[in-house]
Image (spheres, rainbow, N blue to C red):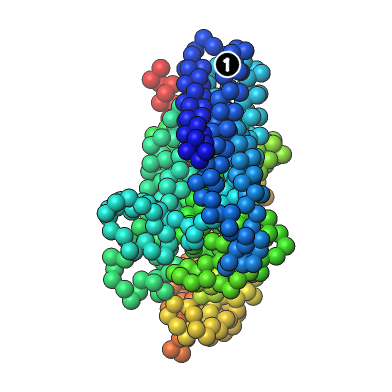
Amino acid sequence: MSFALLIIGGLLLLGGIAFLIYNFVRFNKDPLTDAFTKKDWINFVVGVVAVGLGLAGMLASAFEFNPAWKEIVEFEKGALAGRSVSYIGNYLKAILGGFFFGVSFATLWTSFSVVVAKRKLADFEKKFFKWAMLGAIAPSVILFFVWTDAFGAYISYPLPSGIYIGDGVGVFNAFNKGSFEGLKIAFYAIFILSGAGISYFVTDYRLNKKFKKRDLFATTLIFGFVSGIIGARIWYVVGNWTREFANGPFHRVFEVWNGGLTVLGGVFLGVIVGALWFTHEHKEVDWRSAFDIAVPTILLAQALGRLGNFTNVEVYGQAVKVEGLWNILPSYVLQQMNLNNGGGMLPDGMIHVPLFLIEALLNLGGYFIIAYGVKALLKKKLAPGDLLFAYFIWYGLVRIILEPMRDSNFNMGSDNSWSISNSLIYIITGVGGILCFHLYEAIKAKKDKGLTPLWSSIVILSTLLFPLLQSVSLSTEKDGSGIVTPFTGFEVMAKTPIYIVAYALLVLSLICFILVFVFSKKEDKEKLARYFSIGGMSLAGISAVLMIFGQNTIEANGQYVNLSYGFFLMIAFAILGAALSLMPIFAEKHFDKIKKEEALETQSE
């Protein structure tokens, strides 16, 4: 019975997949066909049903091969210790969940192939496959959790985190990966690469739809992805220097395979390098409109990449009891979240908050909100680049929400201040980028009278309030742990002259921008307004530099100094105020460049 189910199920699954691939490749490549025939629809239904039946049969064979599972009537230990286990219930869950998952997932990827690859499509098929693709996403995710949950009581923990190829081939987990020699392929790496692939295909489809060009982002993905990995590592090393790297061999800085990447740094460098390369390679395409499409898809990649934290038993939240809504999670998620990074378990009935899952769901939701919701609701008010920077705002908010839940073993900086401060900088970057691009459009339309100094004044005024927040912490340990004593910015200023100077420069900068606002209303004062604008920008920039390097002048009394939220925000807002004041100069030079290029093109014609 077990062998029969395995063989028949395998043949149906592989046969159904091959049958669907053959039919959809043929349809997608046929330039003369834009609609399904009756036979095509029948083949489609037969194929997805075969996939569902095949998967259900193979999952049923797993139960038939393991009759000892009937003897397991409760969880012995872990998050679900003492809870009953129903063999019949799990058997049915595997069969039914597997069947409907097979059908929904086969519908998802076949519909995706049509939407992405088919250039000419009839109206009905266009609507059907678009909505079939979108409609199959949620059922596929839910049903995946349903059928996999059927095996939660019968598998061992920790779950595998990778594959090794050495003295044989097998799997390793987060606790025993050091015990195997040879080539190791971590699931985390597979998740990251798969996420990048999904991000690219979605980007390519939507760019082709807008600009009628394929593979616009092919080389940009390579430069952006590699730069993103470098940026993620640099950000992690800087944030954990005293905790992990200061007292160890320097080569550990480059050992990315041992873990240690920070999304916040990766996206920053990846987007910057990607934008520079894209503008160099595709001068005919508006890079802001292209990145409005591309950057939000990073959320899809991040959602998949977070599964690597799950298999690695890392970056989880604080310990909580398994009660309330936690009970809806699959059993294997709860059991895995009962483990501690590096070995050991929490007491029975406890789990670490699964931040990987919360962030993955928030990232998925964020993509659809930005790419479809914001675009639909604010279509007439959006400027090119708004959706690009909406990503930074969304992800910064996500991290602000999740960081306080994080287990202290995974904090970056004193009291996790590094991660939270960088999350705030993400939000500021997003808001600042949107302000800059709207200001650029206003200057282009000659509707910017007084707008630049007004926004700069508001930003600098906000900066003057941030010293009310915790701005510095002193710790007895080099890694920011031990006894931590927080201070507000004003408390630090009372003892540190360099911060008094920095604050005074910000006040002068605010006065300059207010004067610019006043003079910008008078045509005979435009030159004077320009001088004050440059002065305000310079003062804000110098203030930011003094605050960055002023850390080394703080009287620490033998303790270690860590900048915290207040000064981080002051630095970020000072830079933003300076950047906003530069926009008119940048915009004017850019417009002049465009006019010269258009004049040269006219002469050549």
User: Can I make out residue 595 in this image?
Assistant: no
Amino acid type shown at disc 1: Asp
In this figure, which residue is indicated by the disc labeled 1? Answer: 40
Q: Residue at x 55, y 37 (%)?
A: 57
Q: Observer-nearest residue: 195 or 245?
A: 195
Whether residue 168 can be seen here: yes
Residue furthest top as drawn = 32
Which quadrant, please, contains the C terminus? top left
Task: Please name the residue shown 60% across and 76% down the image.
Answer: 470
Coordinates of residue 102 in the picture (x, y in percent):
57, 35
Mark 1 crowd level (few <14, some 14–19, many ≥20, 10 Å Cα): some
| Viewer-side residue, 264 vs 452 | 264
Secondary structure found at label 1: helix
For residue 182, side relative to residue 528 (left or right): left
Q: Is residue 481 above or below residue 323?
A: below
Q: Quadrant of residue 316?
A: bottom right
